[in-house]
Amino acid sequence: MEQGCKRAGSTAEAVSDADVVVTMLPAAQHVLGVYRDQVFGKAPKSALLIDCSTIDVASARTVEEEASAQGYTMVDAPVSGGIAAAASGNLAFMVGGSDEAFERAKPFIEPMAKAVIHAGGAGAGKRRRSATT
């Protein structure tokens, strides 16, 4: 284990008994593929899903709608700050999702952040993130 993490054999294995699933992937197609093929139906319905990828608003809304339809709670939470900020817990997160989902996600995001901003409903974190970059 390095910094409290252990390696899983697959994404499905990693999420199989997770309380929280956090993803940060390179593009919308990866986010949609990972959630559709490896998270939905494999993570417990009680798991909170947090996607920190910087993707387009429409894709963020699509994956959050699909998560909700399958009984999951999800937020989009793209970050700003880079590697040094990540290592020191000084990232800024713009979070999109319901008030309830935001409150559930906040304790998991705060240890990594200097700022956690609830930007509004599904996809709002992505919309706010794009407006600030």
Image (cartoon, rainbow, N blue to C red):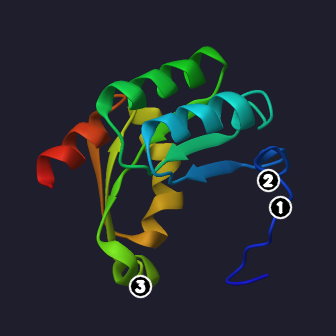
Q: Is residue 50 left or right of residue 71?
A: left
Would you identify the image quadrant in which residue 98 lies? top left
Give the camera-side residue of 31 and 128: 31
At 79% from the left edge and 72% from the top edge, which residue is drawn? 6
Q: Quadrant of the C terminus?
A: bottom left
Residue 29 percent across, percent down from the top left: 50, 35
At 50% from the left edge and 51% from the top edge, which residue is drawn? 25
Quick one: SS at disc 3? helix
At 85% from the left edge and 49% from the top edge, which residue is drawn? 13
The earlier-in-sequence mark between 3 and 1 is 1
CA gap, disc 3 and disc 1: 25 Å
Give the camera-side residue of 101 and 34: 34
To which residue does mark 1 refer?
8
User: For mark 3, does the 10 Å Cα neighbourhood hold few (<14), some (14 to 19), or many (20 or more) residues?
Assistant: few
Which one is closest to the eye, mark 3 or mark 1?
Answer: 1
Quick one: SS at disc 1? loop
Q: Is residue 37 left or right of residue 110?
A: right
Residue 99 percent across, percent down from the top left: 39, 34
To which residue does mark 3 refer?
88
Would you identify the image quadrant in which residue 72 lies? top right
CA gap, disc 2 and disc 1: 5 Å
Q: Are marks 2 and 1 in contact (CB under 8 Å)?
A: yes
Which one is closest to the eye, mark 3 or mark 2?
Answer: 2
User: For mark 1, does the 10 Å Cα neighbourhood hold few (<14), some (14 to 19), or many (20 or more) residues?
Assistant: few
Count up the numbered dots.
Answer: 3
CA gap, disc 3 and disc 2: 25 Å
**Which of the labelled discs sits on residue 14, or is there none?**
2
Q: Is residue 41 left or right of residue 106?
A: right
Q: Quadrant of the N terminus?
A: bottom right
Residue 27 percent across, percent down from the top left: 44, 44
